[in-house]
Image: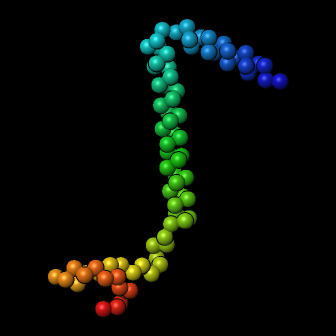
Amino acid sequence: MLTWLRDWWDGVELWLTQLWFPFQFALVLMVLLPVCLGLAWLIDRVVDFVSGLFGRDRLAEPQADYDREPGTGDGVRREPGES
């Protein structure tokens, strides 16, 4: 069914392996560098999108934080507005 593709790929592979090594290296870089950069960009966009879906809502009430009294450094956890 895909014998034409297999035969074509064998021809490309044979041509590439018979090239002088610096040409092989340059050709691989010309192909792989843009592919890797595009893939890295795509992964970055997907991670940003997914983290935006599952991340904290920036408009929500702030979480309780560790408040330190000046000079005491007690580090007691207090709810917002509590003294």
Instruction: Please state if 20 lies on the left or on the right of 6 as rendered.
Output: left
* Residue displayed at 25% across by 81% down: 74
Pick out the residue farthest to the right.
1
Number of marks present in the image shown: 0
> Residue 69 sits in which quadrant?
bottom left
Q: Position of residue 27 (x, y in %)?
A: 50, 20
Instruction: Please state if 12 lies on the left or on the right of 3 as rendered.
Output: left
* Residue displayed at 48% across by 8% down: 20
Above/below status of 75 relative to 53: below
> Residue 78 sits in which quadrant?
bottom left
**Quarter that holds the C terminus:** bottom left
* Residue displayed at 73% across by 15% down: 7
In front here: 74 or 83? 74
Q: Position of residue 40 (x, y in %)?
A: 49, 42
Instruction: Please state if 17 lies on the left or on the right of 22 as rendered.
Output: right
**Quarter that holds the N terminus:** top right
In front here: 54 or 45? 54
Above/below status of 81 relative to 29: below
* Residue displayed at 48% across by 38% down: 37
